[in-house]
C-alpha cells in the first residue's frame, strides 16, 4: 500500500523558530528525543473517526484518511461536534482538525470502504482504492482520482476494477493497483494491474497472481514494481507473498520461492533510497509475523526481524523504520519474550534492534489488530507521524482509529524511578533503582539526592527500553558509619522533562560490616536478591556490580520477617498461585555457575524455587539449571542435556524452617548442598544452552522427574544469589554458618520530650510547639529527652546518631555549626523557659557543621561512650550554636508527624 512520502521525507527536522501550531494550540519547539528517532511519543489532539482507518496519504499539509466509518468527532476535551464523514476525511496536518474537503465513498449494496490512498509525485492528484461505486455521487469502480486543489473527482479517470482494490502506487504517468480483482475494464488482470494516470486506460503491465494482492510499491528508479500479498505464483512462477516485476511489462524481475513461510503473507511494502521493507502477517504455528529489509538494486535480504505479532504497516523515515503491529514475542531477535502486545515500534533501517520509541495503542474493534497504516505529513516545516487503524486507545487514553505524533514538543516525562538503598560495610551506601520508561527517549539522566538536599550528590546516565529496564546504581562513599540517610532519584530525558522524585529510600550505614551479604558479594555473586524491597515491582540486585534486578509478578508478599539471615533483612513470600520474580536481563549462562537461596515452606504441593528459563511472565518452553521441590518436600537440582539430569535429596525440607540450598556445575560436574552439607553429585558438565532469565517462585517443570503438583512455589525465599563460578564446599559451609552469626541490632528512639528556650520571650514555654529552634545570638537552645534501653545481652553500644529534620519555612537551614551537648540540669517539656533553662555540659557529643535550606533529614554521629554510660535511663541532649543564623527544626509534636528528632543506637558484639 503506497502512501505519500515525497518531499516530507526529505524535510530537515526543525528544532526551533518554526512557530508551528500543533494539535489544537501551540506546541513548544523542543525537539529532543533519543536519535535517530524523529518523533515524540506524545499523541497530539486529533479528530477521530467512528470506525476503522485503512489508508493515509498526505499532500500540501493535508492528511487524507480512508477506511470504513461514517463520522468524525473531536478529541476528548475539545470543542466541536461530530460531523458526517463517509469512509473518507481530510485533516490539517498541524492541528488534527478536519478541513473543508469532504468526499463520500458509497456503493449501492454491501459496505463501502476505502482501502488505499496515495498521491501523485507532483502532489496534485489523490488516488483512492477500495470497494465503492461512487464518490460524491460520481460513478467510479473501486478506484478514483481526486483533484487535491479542488477536492473533486476527476471524471476523466474511469478505470473499471471488478473487485476490491487494496493498494495503489503512482508514478507521473501510471497508477499501479493490487487487490482482489481478476479483470480490469473487462480484460484479464489477476490481482495486479496498471492504468494510465491521465484517463485510466489499461496498461500492458501483467503480473497475474493466484491469490489477492495486498501491497504494491514502485522502486525509486521507476524500473520495477514490488508486489506483496497472499499469492503463491505470479505469472505462473513460484514466488510466495513477495515478487519484483518489470514496471512496464509485469514480467518477473525477481521471484522469492520459499523465502516467506507458506502460512504468512505480505501486508505492506515501503521503499526508501537504499532498499524496501515488507510488513508480514502469519496464521497458525511457525509463522513469520515480522519485517524484512531488502536492498536496492539487488533485491537481496538485508535483515529479517522475526518478532511475532502480525505486522500491518512499515514506514521508513530518516533512517528509521517505523512499524505497526501487535508484536508480542521478539525473543528470536534477542529482545522481549512472549507476553504483552506492543503496537508501535521503531528500529534502524540497517538492523533489527528496537529503538527508544514505543507509544502504544490497544487492539481495538474489528479484527483486534490495532494500528494498520502510517504516513508522514508536514506543515510549516514540521513533520508529523500519523497512525490509523482500529484501536480505541493511545497510550492508555481514549482515542479511536487515528492519532499523530510531532517531531517537536516532547512533553512526556520519564516514569518515576523505583529506588532502594543498602549498606553492607562502613562508609558505603549502594543506591540502586529500576531504570525509568520514556516512550521516546532511551537515554536518560538520573540524579541522586541525599537527605532532601536540592543539589544532587550523584549523576548517572543509563539506557532503557520498554522491554529492557535494567537496574542502575550509584555508590555513596561519603556516608558515615552509624548514620542514617535517605535518597531520592529523578530521571530526566533529552528534552529536559523531569520525573517526580522516587519515594525516599532510607538506610543506616553499619558500624561493622554485615557478615553474610559482605561474604556473598566478596565471593563474586553477579545476581543477589535480598528481598528487602518495600514496594512492587522491583527486586533490587545487591551484588557489587551485576545490576541484575528482578521484577515482581503477581504481587508477592514483601518484607516478610524474620528472614533467613540475622539482622534487619527480610524475606519474600510466594502464594503458590501466580506470584513469582523474573530477571530483567536476558543472558546466557556459561559452563560454570552456582545457584544459592534460602527457603522456608510447609507446602505439600512442591514448586520451583529458582531456575533459568526463556520466558519472563509466562511459563518457559526451555528451562533448566533449576532447583525445585517435590510434593513430599525433597529437593531436586537438574539440568537438561537432551535428557533430564538430576540430583534429589533423600530427606524432606518442607518443615516450616529456614534451609540453605546451593547447586553448582562446572568441570567437576554437578553438586547439591543443603544446610552446608553435600547431598549428592553427578558427573554432568553440560546444560541446555539458550538465552533466558533467572526466575524465582515459578517456571515450567513439564517432563521433569517427580514433577510437583504445582510449578508455583508456596513459601518464603531469601538471599537468592547466582555466581559465574563454582562455590567450593568450604564457601558453602561458610555461608551457611554466617547466616546465624551475631548481627548488629538497631534501636530507633523518638524524643520523649522536646522544647526550646527563646531569649526574646524569657517567660514563654514551647513544649507544644511543632518547631524547635537553635541560635547563638539572640539565643535559642533546643532540649531533647530520650528514654534509653539497656544494651541487649552479649552486646555493647557501638554507635549513636541523632537525626533532625529542617522545617519547610524559608531559611530554615543555618550556616553556623550546631553542637550536640549533654544537659546537666533538670527540665521538663511543659515548664522550661529561657529564664529557668537547664545548664549544659562539655565536651560536645557531636555536631552538625552547617545545615542547608530545604526540608531534609540531617544526622550527626554522637560520642558512643558518653551515651553508653546512660543506657537504661533517661538521657537529655541540647542543640546549641554560637552564631546568629537560626536553625528551625520539626519537633516531635509536628503536625506532619515527621518522626524526628530521632536517636539511633546500634549494638554489636564487644
Image (spheres, helix red, strand yellow):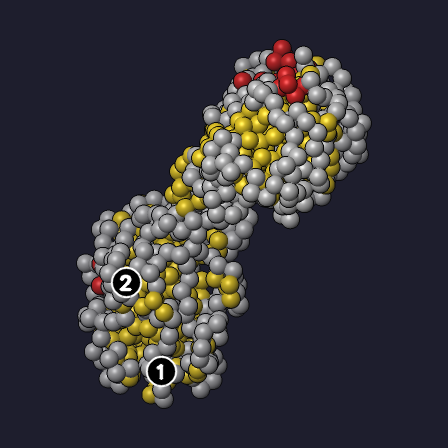
Residue 93 shows in the view: yes
Q: Residue at x 56, y 43 (%)?
A: 760
Residue 111 coordinates in the image, percent (x, y): 47, 79
Q: Residue furthest top?
A: 730
Q: Quadrant of residue 860?
A: top right
Q: Residues within 10 Å of mark 2 (few under 14, many from 20)?
A: many
Residue 461 coordinates in the image, percent (x, y): 39, 38
Q: Nearer the viewer, residue 371 or 704?
A: 371
Q: Nearer the viewer, residue 55 or 33?
A: 33
Q: Residues within 10 Å of mark 1 (few under 14, many from 20)?
A: some
Please name the residue that numbered disc 2 is placed on: 382
Q: Are marks 2 and 1 in contact (CB under 8 Å)?
A: no
Q: Nearer the viewer, mark 2 or mark 1?
A: 2
Q: Quadrant of the C terminus?
A: top right
Q: Residue at x 69, y 17 (%)?
A: 869
- Determine which of the numbered discs, if any, sits on residue 102 in the image: 1
Residue 870 coordinates in the image, percent (x, y): 70, 21
Amino acid at each position: 500500500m503506497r502512501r505519500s512520502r515525497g518531499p516530507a521525507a526529505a524535510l530537515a527536522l526543525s528544532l526551533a523558530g518554526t512557530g508551528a501550531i500543533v494539535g489544537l494550540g501551540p506546541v513548544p519547539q523542543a525537539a529532543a528525543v533519543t536519535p535517530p528517532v524523529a518523533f515524540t511519543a506524545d499523541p497530539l489532539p486529533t479528530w477521530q473517526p467512528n470506525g476503522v482507518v485503512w489508508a493515509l496519504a498526505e499532500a500540501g499539509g493535508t492528511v487524507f484518511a480512508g477506511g470504513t466509518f461514517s463520522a468524525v468527532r473531536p478529541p476528548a476535551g475539545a470543542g466541536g461536534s461530530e460531523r458526517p464523514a463517509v469512509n473518507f476525511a481530510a485533516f490539517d496536518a498541524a492541528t488534527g482538525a478536519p478541513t473543508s474537503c469532504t468526499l463520500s465513498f458509497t456503493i449501492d449494496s454491501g459496505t463501502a470502504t476505502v482501502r488505499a490512498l496515495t498521491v501523485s509525485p507532483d502532489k496534485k492528484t489523490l488516488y483512492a482504492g477500495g470497494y465503492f461505486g461512487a464518490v460524491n455521487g460520481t460513478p467510479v469502480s473501486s478506484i478514483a482520482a481526486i483533484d487535491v486543489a479542488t477536492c473533486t473527482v476527476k471524471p476523466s479517470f474511469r478505470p473499471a476494477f471488478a473487485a476490491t482494490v487494496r493498494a495503489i502506487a503512482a508514478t507521473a504517468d501510471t497508477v499501479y493497483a493490487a487487490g482482489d480483482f481478476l479483470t480490469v475494464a473487462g480484460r484479464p488482470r489477476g490481482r495486479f494491474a496498471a492504468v494510465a494516470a491521465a484517463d485510466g486506460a489499461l496498461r500492458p503491465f501483467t503480473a497475474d497472481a493466484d491469490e489477492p494482492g495486498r501491497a504494491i510499491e514502485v522502486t525509486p528508479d521507476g524500473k520495477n514494481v514490488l508486489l506483496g500479498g497472499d499469492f503463491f505464483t505470479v505469472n505462473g512462477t513460484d514466488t510466495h507473498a513477495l515478487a519484483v516485476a518489470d514496471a512496464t511489462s509485469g514480467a518477473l524481475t525477481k521471484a522469492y520461492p520459499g523465502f516467506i513461510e507458506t502460512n504468512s503473507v505480505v501486508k505492506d511494502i515501503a521503499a526508501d533510497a537504499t532498499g524496501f521493507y515488507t510488513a508480514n502477517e502469519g496464521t497458525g504455528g511457525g509463522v513469520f509475523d515480522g519485517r524484512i529489509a531488502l536492498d536496492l538494486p539487488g533485491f537481496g535480504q538485508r535483515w529479517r526481524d522475526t518478532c511475532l505479532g502480525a505486522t500491518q504497516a512499515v514506514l521508513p523515515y530518516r533512517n528509521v523504520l517505523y512499524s505497526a503491529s501487535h508484536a508480542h514475542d521478539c525473543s528470536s531477535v534477542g529482545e522481549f519474550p512472549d507476553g504483552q502486545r506492543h503496537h508501535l515500534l521503531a528500529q534502524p533501517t540497517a538492523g533489527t534492534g528496537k529503538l527508544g520509541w514505543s507509544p502504544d495503542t490497544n487492539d481495538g474493534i474489528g479484527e483486534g489488530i490495532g494500528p494498520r497504516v502510517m504516513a508522514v505529513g508536514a506543515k510549516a516545516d514540521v513533520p508529523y507521524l500519523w497512525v490509523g487503524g482500529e484501536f480505541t486507545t493511545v497510550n492508555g487514553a481514549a482515542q479511536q482509529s487515528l492519532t499523530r505524533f510531532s517531531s517537536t514538543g516532547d512533553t512526556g516525562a520519564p516514569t518515576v524511578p523505583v529506588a532502594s538503598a543498602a549498606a553492607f560495610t562502613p562508609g558505603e551506601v549502594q543506591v540502586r533503582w529500576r531504570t525509568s520508561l520514556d516512550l521516546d527517549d532511551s537515554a536518560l539522566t538520573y540524579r541522586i539526592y541525599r537527605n532532601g538536599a536540592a543539589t544532587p550528590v550523584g549523576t548517572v546516565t543509563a539506557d532503557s527500553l520498554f522491554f529492557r529496564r535494567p537496574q542502575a546504581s550509584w555508590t555513596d562513599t561519603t556516608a558515615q558509619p552509624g548514620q542514617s540517610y535517605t535518597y531520592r532519584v529523578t530521571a530526566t530525558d533529552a528534552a529536559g522533562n523531569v520525573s517526580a522524585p522516587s519515594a525516599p529510600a532510607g538506610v543506616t550505614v553499619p558500624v561493622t560490616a554485615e557478615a553474610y551479604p559482605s561474604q556473598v558479594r566478596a565471593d563474586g555473586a553477579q545476581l543477589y536478591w535480598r528481598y528487602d524491597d518495600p514496594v512492587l515491582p522491583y527486586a533490587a540486585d545487591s551484588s557489587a556490580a551485576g545490576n541484575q534486578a528482578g521484577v515482581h509478578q503477581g504481587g508477592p508478599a514483601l518484607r516478610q520477617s524474620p528472614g533467613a539471615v540475622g539482622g534487619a533483612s527480610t524475606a519474600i513470600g510466594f502464594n503458590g498461585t501466580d506470584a513469582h520474580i523474573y530477571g530483567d536481563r536476558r543472558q546466557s549462562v556459561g559452563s560454570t555457575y552456582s545457584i544459592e537461596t534460602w527457603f522456608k515452606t510447609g507446602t505439600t504441593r512442591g514448586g520451583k524455587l529458582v531456575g533459568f528459563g526463556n520466558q519472563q511472565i509466562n511459563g518457559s518452553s526451555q528451562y533448566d539449571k533449576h532447583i525445585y521441590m517435590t510434593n513430599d518436600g525433597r529437593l531436586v537440582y537438574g539440568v537438561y542435556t537432551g535428557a533430564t539430569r538430576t540430583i534429589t535429596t533423600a530427606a524432606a525440607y518442607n518443615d516450616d524452617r529456614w534451609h540453605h540450598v546451593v547447586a553448582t556445575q562446572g568441570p567437576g560436574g554437578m553438586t547439591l548442598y543443603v544446610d552446608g552439607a553435600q547431598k549428592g553429585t553427578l558427573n554432568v558438565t553440560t546444560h541446555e544452552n539458550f538465552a533466558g532469565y533467572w526466575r524465582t517462585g515459578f517456571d515450567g517443570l513439564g517432563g521433569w522427574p517427580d514433577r510437583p503438583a504445582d510449578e508455583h512455589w508456596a513459601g518464603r525465599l531469601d538471599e537468592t544469589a547466582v555466581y559465574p563460578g563454582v562455590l567450593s564446599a568450604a564457601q558453602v559451609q561458610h555461608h551457611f554458618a554466617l547466616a546465624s552469626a551475631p548481627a548488629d541490632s538497631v534501636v530507633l528512639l523518638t524524643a520523649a520530650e522536646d522544647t526550646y528556650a527563646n531569649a526574646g520571650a524569657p517567660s514563654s514555654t514551647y513544649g507544644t510547639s511543632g518547631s524547635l529552634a537553635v541560635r547563638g545570638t539572640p539565643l535559642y537552645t533546643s532540649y531533647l529527652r530520650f528514654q534509653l534501653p539497656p544494651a541487649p545481652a552479649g552486646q555493647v553500644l557501638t554507635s549513636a546518631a541523632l537525626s533532625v529534620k529542617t522545617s519547610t519555612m524559608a531559611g530554615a537551614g543555618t550556616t553556623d555549626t550546631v553542637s550536640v551537648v549533654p544537659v546537666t540540669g533538670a527540665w521538663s517539656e511543659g515548664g522550661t523557659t529561657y529564664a529557668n533553662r537547664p545548664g549544659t555540659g562539655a565536651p560536645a557529643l557531636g555536631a552538625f557543621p552547617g545545615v542547608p535550606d530545604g526540608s531534609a533529614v540531617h544526622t550527626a554521629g554522637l560520642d558512643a561512650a558518653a551515651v553508653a554510660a546512660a543506657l537504661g535511663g533517661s538521657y537529655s541532649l541540647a542543640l546549641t550554636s554560637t552564631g546568629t543564623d537560626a536553625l528551625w527544626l520539626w519537633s516531635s509534636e509536628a503536625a506532619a508527624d515527621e518522626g524526628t528528632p530521632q536517636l539511633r543506637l546500634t549494638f554489636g558484639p564487644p
